[in-house]
Amino acid sequence: MYKEWRLMFWLLLLFVVGQFFFMAKGIQNVPFFLYYMYSQKHPPKDSIAVYLIKTSTGYYDHKKLSSREQELLMNSVGYYVNLKRDGDGINETIKKRFGKITGKGGLSYLQEQLVNDSSALLQFPEWWGRYFQTVVKNKFDSVSVVRSYVSTAPPYNKSATDSLVFTIKLK
Amino acid sequence: MARAIFSWLFIILVHFFFNNSLLSQLQQPPLIYPGSDNSFWLLHMLNIPQFLLQHCWAALIFDILLTCSCIICIIIPQQRVFTWITVAGTWILYIAYCSAAGKHYAQIGYLLAPIPFLALSMKRFDMLWELVRYWVCFLYVCAGIYKLWYGGFIYSDNMSHILVQDNAEWFVFTRSGPAYGLYQYLVENPGISQWFYRIATFFDLAMLVGFFTKRYDKWLLAGLVLFHLGNFLLLHISFVEQSLIFAPFLPWRRWANHFQTNTSDD
C-alpha cells in the first residue's frame, strides 16, 4: 500500500495508532469504536430498575415497538432522570479539557453547545409525549412514565409501587 | 456491487423511516448527549446535530437529501459526489440519532460498508474494501478479547445476570409462552446460559482467522450471522443497521464471474 497509495498508508497508520490510543484510554471516539459491550462481570442484583409507560388502561407494552423506537422513547427517559438527579456532568469535563486553553467566552460557548440546560430538561416531557403519539397507534388522553423494579428471582415480578417520573397530557 | 451495497443501505434507511427514526421523524428532541466522544463534541460544537434535531425543515431536507443521494448511488454508481453526500449523511445521522437517544450505539455496519465506494479507481476501491473487512475483523476480535480481559468470560453466572437485566422490562409484559420458558430456563441454569456467552466469545475470536486468509470467509460470515441472531433472540438486540458488516465476507467476485459467465452464454 505504501507504493500504491502513500496517503492512505499514512492515514491507516494514524488510524491504527489512534485506535490503540483510545483503547488504552478506554474512551470511544468515532471512528475509533470500542466493542467492549457485555464484556464486564455483571454482578447479581436483587432487582432491576425499569421504566414503564402507565396509561388509563394499564401499562403500555413498549416492547412491541421496534428497537429504534424503544431506544429513543425509553433510553432517553433514563438519560433524562440521570440529568435531573445528577446534573449534566459534561460541565466539569469542559472545564477540565478547555479550562486552561480558552477564556470565559470560549467556555461559555462550549457550555451552550454541549450542556443540557434547565430549559431543555423542561421541554423533555412534552417532546416525549409528541414522539410517543407518533409511534403508538392507540390514542391516550394522558400517560405517565414511571420507574419500577423487577425482581431478579423467578417469577420476575414487578414491584407493587411505582415512582412517577412525569405525567404528560396528550390531548 | 455498488448497486447491491447502496440498495442494502437504502433498505436500512427505509427501515429507519418505518420505525420513526429518521431525523425529521424525531419530533425535535431537546436533550443532547455528546458524552466523552471527541468527534461528537466537535460536531456539537459546530451546532450540526442540534440544528438538525431542533429544526424540522432542516431535518426533512437532510433526510430527503440522504435518501435521494443513496438512490442516485444505486442508479449511477460511477459518480462520486452523491457517494460523498451519502457517506457523510449516514455519519451525521448516526451521531445526531445517538445524541437524541442518550446513548452511543454500536450498530455501525451502515457507516462502514459504503466508504470504499468513495475511491476513484478499482485498485483503490479494492484496497479500501479489504481495509473495511479487516476493520470488521478487528472490532469483533477486540470484542472477544475484552470479554476475556474484563472477566465476563470466566464469571460463570455472567450470561444469566445479563439475561435478567436485559429482559427485565420484557418480563413485565410476558409471563408465559415458549420464549418466557426459554429465558427462565437459561436464567435458572447459569452454567448452560454461560455456554452461550462462551460460544459468542468464540465467534468473536474466530474473526482473527480473517486477518490471515479469506478461505474461511463463509464460516466467519455464518459465525457473525449466528452471533447477531443470538443477540436478537436472547437480548432483543436488532441488527438491521449492523447487517452491512456481512458484506465484506460475501463472495462478490465469484458471483460477478458467475453472472458474467451466464451473460456471455446468453
Image (tube, rainbow, N blue to C red):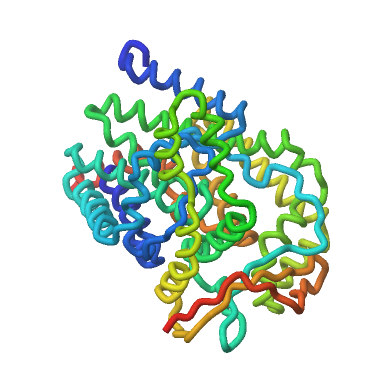
Q: Front-most of B253 and B76?
A: B76
Q: Residue at x 30, y 46 (%)?
A: B89
Quarter of the picture containing the N terminus of chain A is top left
Q: Is residue A110 visible?
A: yes
Q: Front-most of B149 and A110?
A: A110
Q: Residue at x 58, y 31 (%)?
A: B208
> Along the horizontal axis of the image, is B193 left or right of B72?
right
Q: Residue furthest top?
A: A3
The image quadrant of residue A49 is: bottom right
Quarter of the picture containing the C terminus of chain A is bottom left
> Along the horizontal axis of the image, is A94 left or right of B23?
right
Q: Is residue B232 visible?
A: no
Q: Return the x and y of residue B118 as percentages of the image width and height.
A: 27, 34
The image quadrant of residue B46 is: top left
Examine the rendered structure and indicate whether residue B71 appears above or below residue B27.
above
Q: Residue furthest front?
A: A104
Q: Return the x and y of residue A65 as percentages of the image width and height.
A: 50, 71
Q: Return the x and y of residue A86 as percentages of the image width and height.
A: 63, 52
